[in-house]
Amino acid sequence: MRTAILASLLCLPLFSSCAAVVAAGAAGAYVISRDVEGNVYETRLNLDITKVWPTVKTTLSDASLDTIEIDEGIRMAKAKIDGASVTVSCEAYDLDKTIMRTRASKYAGTINDAEMARLIQEKIIRKLEP
């Protein structure tokens, strides 16, 4: 009896780490890659632009107290969020694949706010997950 309990206790960390890896894989199922270049967060998503773009607009609208600026032609949205000017653009680069770029700056664009850009992009990605 003690051997069975000991064996199950020794296997417990193995099973819990597998569950964590499976959970992490399921959570990021849509994200292909993330890059940060020049304080612009770029994420490649395994989703069609018709699903990503409306989510970007609603997320920015929910986060901003002001009206957001939207350019449907180039799929770019701008919003003022907590004193930062946030710009999110979406681009379809293949069938069911989208590139989303997020940039934020403060003080009339003189100082980049990488933390705000990261937060907004993560919020959009969370809304896209099932």
Image (tube, grey):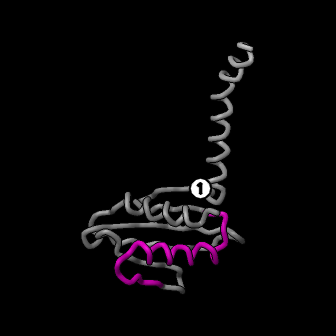
Instruction: Choose between 113 and 128: the one closer to the eye.
Output: 128
Question: Is residue 92 magenta-colored?
Answer: no
120 sits to left or right of 110: right
Q: In which quarter of the image is the N terminus?
A: top right
Horizontal and vertical percent for residue 14? Answer: 67, 29
Neighbour tally class for label 1: few under 14, some 14-19, many 20 plus, Cα within 10 Å: few
- Of residues 110 and 21, the one nearer the viewer is 21
The front one of 76 and 5 is 5
Q: Is residue 93 above or below residue 4?
A: below
Image position of 124 with respect to 15: above or below: below
- For residue 55, what is the image quadrant? bottom right
Please indicate whether residue 105 sits to the left or right of residue 21 in the image.
left
Whether residue 77 sits left or right of residue 29 in the image: it is left
Give the vertical position of 36 relative to 9 (above or below). Answer: below
Q: What stretch is highlighted in magenta?
A: 45-70
Q: Which residue is drawn at 55% across and 62% down?
A: 126
Quadrant where the C terminus is found in the figure: bottom right
Residue 115 % position (x, y): 37, 57
Question: What kind of residue is marked 1?
Answer: Ser
Name the image quarter holding residue 8.
top right
Residue displayed at 48% across by 72% down:
59
Residue drawn 67% across the image and 44% down it: 22
Q: Where is residue 109 in the image (x, y as percent from the top left)?
A: 29, 70
Question: In the displayed structure, does residue 54 sit left or right of residue 25?
Answer: left
| Extreme residue in the top direction | 2
* Number of numbered discs on residues: 1
Task: Provide the residue designation for mark 1.
Answer: 33
Task: Describe the element under mark 1 as helix, strand or loop.
Answer: strand
Q: Quadrant of residue 50?
A: bottom right
Residue sitting at 42 percent across and 83 percent down?
69
